[in-house]
Image: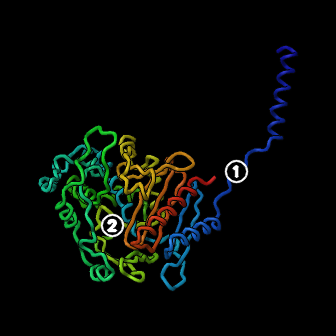
Amino acid sequence: MTAPRRLAAIVLASLALSLTLTTPSAPAPAPLTPDRLRQEAVGVLETTRAVSLHIRVRDRRHTVEASAGEAALGTGRPVPSGAHFRAASVTKSFVAATVLHLAAERRLSLHDTVEHWLPGLVQGHGNDGSRITVGHLLQHTSGLHDYDSTELTGKTAPDFERGRFDHIDPERLVAAALRHPPDFPPADPGDPEPRWSYSNTGYHLLGAIIEKATGHPWAEEVENRIVRRLGLRGTRVPGDDPYLPKPYAHTYHRFAGSGGYTDTTVRNMAWAGTAGALVSTSRDLDRFFTALLTGRLLPPRELAAMRTTVPSNEEHQQFTPGMRYGLGLMRQPLPCGGSRWGHHGDLEGTFVRTGFTADGRRSVVVTVNGRTTDDTQLLTTEKALQGLIDRLLCLR
């Protein structure tokens, strides 16, 4: 190297070193503290007017939890750590992952019809199981009418009290739904924007298809393929057992016409089946969705199918703006860019909300106990929960 070139190299190296030493680096994002998360919990609880709220946030390996309110009205006891709760419709993500696991094993296909697996079951009143596929059921594009469980369980507090321990077979709910004509025809293959309508009925049919394809009850397949595999110690299908495992927080619902809350914690949830019977914990839901989104549960092809979404309908857009639905997965845009994934759960007395970044690095699981039938308050609550998840996933 000539002398001028050596001099230029020395000058450039010195300049680089000088910039490294003198230019301040961007401050690392401050970790979320329990106090800060507790403030969030208190603020959202005040907005929702609920009884209790619990939040679990994970950023890579850093986990923070906080709660507000009381685990049981009038006791002052906080929501316990590791509380069990009814996951409600978050069950659908477990069921969808199980179906896709069977598809990967070629035990069934997403293109199989309901008629193929359950001959003669879906027919009459314009319903045609030969036109509805497993994929339609998973994505709520079948057009099958969604049953109203209150037609069997009642809409008032006295109705709930009379029937809380009753065993109701999911088949009764499917039969009730099939007495109605479909909401619309099943989506055509390749339709980029099919019509969509949430249907618990379809997920009950998926439970029956899982049993036909494997010879085992759907709960056993979920247990073996997901729960045991991931070590989800707080997750189970309760069957007719009406009690939650300890620890737990009580759930409360203000039924129409009631002046106060009804404690809905103890109840037989067998009727919910594959549409919403699962009991779980925040830690377990985090572990499940993280494993799912990072490819630890499903092969790439099946995971890609699960994450292929269509727009939800206007009713759901009102509560969850921008929501698109895959195969048992919800997707919503984040205000900081990208999307969050997960699934919601709703039941008399409780809300379950989840949010996960696409890479699984950050997660939020929120449970709220104490809800009402008032539409205005429900919308206020939903906006508060959506905003909370957005803030926590976008935290920098």
Q: In this view, does 240 lie to the left or right of 252?
A: left
Q: Is residue 342 left or right of residue 154?
A: right
Residue 382 position, x and y percent, is 47, 63
Q: In this view, does 278 lie to the left or right of 76?
A: left
CA distance for labels 2 and 1: 42 Å
183 or 343, which is in the foreground?
Answer: 183
Question: Height in image: 346 above or below 243?
Answer: above
Asked if one can make out residue 221 in the rendered structure from this viewpoint, the answer is: yes
Toward the front, the furthest residue is: 376
- Check disc 1 and report its element: helix, strand or loop: loop
Asked if one can make out residue 234 in the rendered structure from this viewpoint, the answer is: no
- Check disc 2 and report its element: helix, strand or loop: loop
Residue 395's disc is none
156 or 351, which is in the foreground?
Answer: 156
User: Residue at 27% of width from left, 76% of height from top?
Assistant: 154
| Amino acid at the residue labelled 2 | Ala
